């Protein structure tokens, strides 16, 4: 059954969500205070849809595009909303003010979800009358290619809201994971922080350069991680499964973890060193072109994974 969806914020994350919702057959209102931003977003959406169609990842471009409309009037945008997805920039006061307005203006049965990647939902929903219908639904960018969504209830989010959010994400063909409680950075960012911290450490200690380090993931761990997680990976990497793996490698891994446990700041001199090597292989004026290359590459991977699921 088609729902009425409001996406609040027409930036990078907002336009990605708009495609996800419209692709699943829902009517989407893309809200932003700036008309020119909405217009630019629609131009980008049309390019994204054309790219998706080239990999047979969407059926009808025009139908999906026609399900999305723009609005600069918040009352108009949320008046019939079943689900509101907040996608404004990461500023606590901005989110707090927007959620206050959404709680006052959206229908009482509408779920209010935030795309925040840094703030717990409790930080900007505590004083709301309808706080039980608020939660975080944090996407991985771009969400129309990377399906994972982190569902993070606040201490006052109702169990019904959390269950509804999970089921709704499944219906969109996203892959929801539900956190049992709020934790800084949620899950994906915490995993990414651990990896990035060690990557910066290895470059700072002159063990390896940043370009070669990227190969360790892109041509090593990342090939497995594209279709299985770390626990399944180690479960398959010992004859007797995960317990056998831990018995063989648990102690040396623990010793490495102890060595890594002292966090380091990413100082500007280190950032400059990494940036210099990155710019030697990719000029700054080529970043946007490379981002599109990344998205097209992701599309080929997603298309292949879809075929594998059908086998």
Image (tube, grey):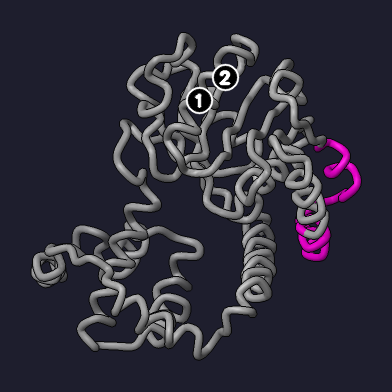
Does residue 94 appear anywhere in the picture?
Answer: yes
Q: Is residue 117 or residue 9 the one in the foreground?
A: 9
**What residue do we see at 91% from left, 47% from top?**
62
Crowd rating for badge 2 (residues with CA inside 10 Å; few <14, some 14–19, many 20+): some
Q: Is residue 95 above or below residue 148?
A: above
In the rendered image, the quadrant that contains the N terminus is top right
Give coordinates of residue 163: x percent, y percent. Answer: 49, 23
The residue that label 1 is drawn on is 97
**What residue do we see at 57% from left, 19% from top?**
101
Magenta run includes residue 279: no
- Quadrant for residue 102, please give it: top right
Q: Is residue 75 or residue 171 the one in the foreground?
A: 75
Alpha-carbon distance for marks 2 and 1? Answer: 6 Å
**What residue do we see at 83% from left, 60% from top?**
50
- Quadrant for residue 93, please give it: top left
Does residue 199 appear anywhere in the picture?
Answer: no
As drawn, which residue projects farthest toward the right?
62
Q: Which residues are magenta?
A: 48-68
The residue that label 2 is drawn on is 101
- Quadrant for residue 222, please give it: bottom left
């Amino acid at each position: 059954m088609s729902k009425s969806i409001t996406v609040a914020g027409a930036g990078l994350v907002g336009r990605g969500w708009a495609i996800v919702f419209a692709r699943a057959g829902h009517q989407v209102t893309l809200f932003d205070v700036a008309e020119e931003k909405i217009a630019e977003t629609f131009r980008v959406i049309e390019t994204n849809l054309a790219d998706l169609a080239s990999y047979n990842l969407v059926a009808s471009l025009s139908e999906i595009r026609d399900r999305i409309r723009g609005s600069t009037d918040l009352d108009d945008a949320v008046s019939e909303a079943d689900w509101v997805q907040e996608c404004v920039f990461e500023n606590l006061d901005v989110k707090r003010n927007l959620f206050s307005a959404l709680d006052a203006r959206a229908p009482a049965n509408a779920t209010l979800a935030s795309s925040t990647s840094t703030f717990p939902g409790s930080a900007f929903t505590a004083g709301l009358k309808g706080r039980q219908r608020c939660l975080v639904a944090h996407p991985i960018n771009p969400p129309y290619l990377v399906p994972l969504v982190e569902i993070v209830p606040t201490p006052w989010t109702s169990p019904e809201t959390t269950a509804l959010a999970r089921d709704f994400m499944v219906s969109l063909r996203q892959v929801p994971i539900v956190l049992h409680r709020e934790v800084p950075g949620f899950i994906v960012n915490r995993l990414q922080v651990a990896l990035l911290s060690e990557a910066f450490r290895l470059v700072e200690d002159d063990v390896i350069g940043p370009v070669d380090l990227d190969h360790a993931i892109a041509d090593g761990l990342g090939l497995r991680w594209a279709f299985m997680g770390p626990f399944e990976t180690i479960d398959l990497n010992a004859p007797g499964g995960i317990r056998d793996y831990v018995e063989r490698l648990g102690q040396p891994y623990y010793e490495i973890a102890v060595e890594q446990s002292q966090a380091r700041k990413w100082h500007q001199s280190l950032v400059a060193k990494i940036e210099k090597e990155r710019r030697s292989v990719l000029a700054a004026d080529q970043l946007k072109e490379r981002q599109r290359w990344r998205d097209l590459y992701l599309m080929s991977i997603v298309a292949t994974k879809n075929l594998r699921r059908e086998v």
